[in-house]
Amino acid sequence: MQRRFLPVLWACTLLLFSMQAAAQAQPASYVVAPFQVNGPAGFSYLEKAIPPMLTSRLFWQGKFEPVAGQDAALQGTAPKGKDAADKLRATHKADYVVWGSVTVLGDEASLDVSVMDDKGKVWQRASKSAVNNLIGGLQSTADAINSDVFGRPVAAAAQPGSSGRAVAPMNPDFVVNESDAGAEYLNPQIRYQGVDTDRLRSQMLDFESHGMAVADIDGDGKNEVLLLDSMNLYAYRWENGRLVKLAEYRLPSMIEPLLVRTVKQSGRVLIVLTGFDNSSNDPLSSILTFAGGKFEPVVARAQYFLNVASLPPLYEPTIIGQGGERSRIVRGPVFEMSVQGDRLVKGASVPNLPKEANVFNFTWIPGNERSGGDYLAVLGDQENLLTFDGKGKRLAKSDDKFSGSGVGIPFDMTMPGMGPSTDSSNQTYYIPMRMVAQDLDKDGRTELLINKPISAAAMIFHNYRTYPQGEIQALLWDGIGMDLLWKTRRIKGTVADLVVADVDNDGMLDLAVNVNSYPGSLGVGKIRTLVTLYPLNTDATQPVPAARDFDN
């Protein structure tokens, strides 16, 4: 009987040890409640925006993790007191509950956070910061909770501005978010010196570029580079570090070109060439194909301003168009467009666009299951970056100015216009430069790549559109604004366009930047153009699993 009993005893003992080990390995859980917002109605979005950011900054893998129902917890209202908070904790079977409030008064914000465990013990933390540095206040609060409540070394937590993520540069010439720098470099200006080692440059071309596109326009499986100047469209192939010209297309004399885009439709690549009639300023665009070594017009005279945008929910590149008039530049709804034979056919209007959006200036940013939906980035009249939710409600406006395009449309200031300024001396609406939305670091969230021109003169004179320097910035929505993730080192010259594509056909994505040379402060030098490639080693990135991605 004893012999029969021993195996059972050993099995029970092993099971007990296994259960104990599993219990020891189980991380403590927490749930973050919606925050109470005290302040102007424009800050009400913080009620649901702060918890995801705080959730990600408290996350400590294997030690302190959010409950599975964290998203569901945000559907309720902010708890009023300990009892309501404890009820939320019990509902979600969490070990801890985190709740609090934010008060906005002028340019200042105060943050009050409370943490309570399942025994009723409460820890509280209050901090103050400028409204535009609320993320820093959140980070310091999260660090304090991590350290005081859970004994976590602050160095192990996410650093301010990092959005709780580990990011490895995809290219050594990229500067990771300056607030992430720490010991990496003492001053961001230092990184602007020295030699760029992982950047490729084409030869200089003897014209000033208006824009660029990259696509396999001839269907041979290799990408071509399209460059546009004031009179011609050129097709090149990148070979051995040089742009080899394949063909050129002379634009009709009455067309002033604005931009070039490509889109695949019905199995062929269409080249969208947008411009205006230089005698009337009315929109006058065309659509081309490329075959047999030459450009062929498909739609010769489309009376729309055209662009290509990736639209939700499928995010398939789509031709969009909008009408125009002399006094308003662009007017009316933005429509989806398609090519049928030699005609451009207008489809449905693009929904949920705010009044600030036009055919040129917006880019949709796809959401994910944790972000709360899609976002819309718009370059406003003053070239500030505006962020909207998927329904067109404005969420944020940047202090910095972006784009810096020198390509524009004249308009009549004697009537209400939509130019970048109401100053009567300004009579040009500058077409916003392309913004690229793409998840390059494979973490399930989409970065926004945008040009930031750098010029002291341009800060004073709006019509000063040649820049000695620029930089491409990768921005990420953090729940409050677009936060800097990484950027290129300073680029000498005026950035004309940017594209993400395999430009040199080596199987690796590139950040391609079209740059015009700087003619000097007097503008007397001849302007030429080149293409710079930053190979993107996306395999070297350190993505955060989507299941742990709680930032918006």
Image (tube, rainbow, N blue to C red):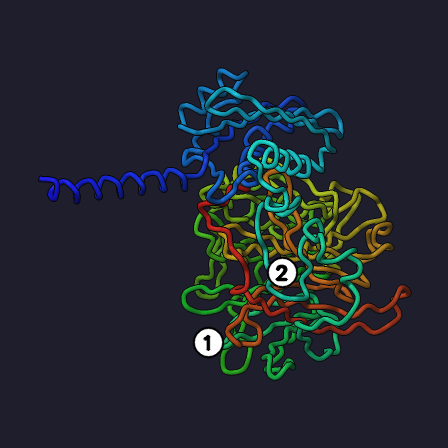
Q: Residue at x 61, y 32 (%)?
A: 148
Q: Residue 412, position in %: x, y?
A: 77, 48
Residue 396: tell me if it is visible: yes
Q: Is residue 22 left or right of residue 333?
A: left
Q: Residue furthest front?
A: 2
Q: Nearer the viewer, residue 193 or 218?
A: 193
Question: What kind of element bears circle 2?
Answer: loop
Quarter holding the N terminus is: top left
The disc labelled 1 sits on which kind of residue?
A: Gly
Q: Nearer the viewer, residue 290 or 219?
A: 219
In the picture, the disc for residue 284 is 2
Residue 306: tell me if it is visible: no
Reading the image, the residue beneath label 1 is: 219
Q: Is residue 189 left or right of residue 75?
A: right
Q: Residue 130, position in %: x, y?
A: 74, 33
Q: Residue 418, position in %: x, y?
A: 71, 44
The disc labelled 2 sits on which kind of residue?
A: Leu
